[in-house]
Image: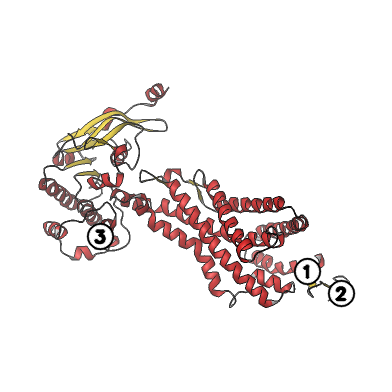
Amino acid sequence: MRRGVFPTTANPMGAIEIGYGQLALGALLLLVNIGLSVALRLGLARDLLVGTVRMTVQLLLIGLVLDWVFATENPAVIVAIAVLMAGLAGRAAVQRTSRRYPGILWNSLVIILGASFLVTGISVLGVIRVDPWYDPQYLIPLHGMLLGNALNGISLGLDRFMEGCAKDRDLIETRLVLGATRWEAAQPIVKEALRTGMIPIINTMMIMGLVSLPGMMTGQILAGADPAQAVQYQILITFMIASCVALATGGVIALAYRALFSPRHQLRTERLRDA
Amino acid sequence: MPLLSVRDAGRRIPDRWLWRDLSFEVAEGERVSVSGPSGSGKSLLLRAMVGLDDLDEGAIAVDGRDLAEWDLPELRMRVRYLPQVPAFAEGTVREALAAPLSFGAARPPADGWIEQRLATLGRGEAFLDARTETLSGGERQIAALLRAMQTGPYVLLLDEATASLDPDATEAAEALISEWLDEDGSRAVVWTSHSRDQRTRVTDRTVDLGDYARLGAEAGEVEA
């Protein structure tokens, strides 16, 4: 290793600090992906490049923003950042679905804001008891992890629910004409959509620590934290994520159900549009 | 009082009225057919009669009560719509018949009702244990008719119920429906059918949607 070009230093917690030189070296690992894509003509080279650049720029920018946010001690600014993050997540969740209905964006936004603020609030105030409550070192990363997972649950659940309504339209209307209420007619699809939204986090919990070491915990350990503390934080965060995903998925499916099943016990698939 | 009445009903698609100022009544014991070329909105009329879709104007009443005042699951227990191609969840005919009995508004059939029907159709218990996905088109329609009739509706709305069936299956379905009608004089049937032969065979009178079709220009004029 050419120490002159890539000087390494230790931070106060004893971890090695990495700089842009190390990042550039690390980027060489992506040559494997590019080689595979080119050799097998997967057509992924361009997306890979865009994805790499986006990821790098987005993270570097958020690093700068976080530096600034951590320096401010203004709760209004910190909460505004959290709201903005939730807004972006709510929009991204809808963009991943393959069908839309009027009002879907609002549904996603309202639910992701409600679910993430509720769970972050309970954790910061009631469980971790951060003082002051708006300390961005806790609030922002916790909130961000919840949003990433809630986004996933919302998009998977919504997508499955809308697909079910469109594909099983005949079956749902058969239940309706046989005297089912809208809830009786929708129930199988609601259940299926809820399962689809919640399965990823359940699967993750099953293998956590055995097959995968969660990113947050790994990050904390790399940054020099006590592994036992890192593990406890990870467990707490996993509980938060699981409840937030359940709230968000359940909430958004409830709203989608109200949008696609009228109070007159009619199925309104004509409100669905392909994205 | 008529079982079912349609008053000044109209249904439009973006560029024109499919039918407008449509009025007719269905009385107890009557067999009414609705005719019209494909695309004339026959299915939409039957669907509107059970509130699956809404009318663009006019009203439909059942037992003298406007559809808007009905609890629709309750109404759909009395007036039952059968689509041209019946849908079944995966499973046996027995399961398909049992599933709708779990709905809050449903009342179970009398003991032995289904077995009795199967006997008239010349079919045994084996039919109940067959999986719906293995049935022929005719058998699926029979299963759908039994499913629709078992909870005791008094009006059946049959949307091209036999259009995709062979003559034997058509005869079986028609026999099942006639028998159901003869059982109780207060029942009625509304058929849509392409076939003039079938209309004269199984119904007493015809409502021709062609008589109520409206052209785009006229619709625009009225709209404005």
Q: Chain of mark 3?
A: B
Identity, as a three-letter code, of the amino acid under mark 1: Leu
Which residue is label 3 attached to? B98
Q: In the image, is residue B32 above or below residue B122?
A: above
Tag in front: 1 or 2: 2
Dot 1: what SS? helix
Which residue is label 2 attached to? A3
Left of B146 or right of it: where is A199? right
Q: In the image, is residue A117 above or below residue B5?
A: below
Q: Quadrant of residue B209?
A: top left
Q: Chain of mark 1?
A: A
Q: Chain of mark 2?
A: A
Work out whether residue A59 or residue B61 is closer to the camera in this orientation and state it. B61
x then y, percent, for residue A21: 82, 67
Same subunit, tags 1 and 2: yes
Dot 2: what SS? loop
Which residue is label 1 attached to? A25
Identity, as a three-letter code, of the amino acid under mark 2: Arg
Labels 1 & 3 near each other (Cβ < 8 A): no
Identity, as a three-letter code, of the amino acid under mark 3: Ala
Left of B114 or right of it: where is A118? right
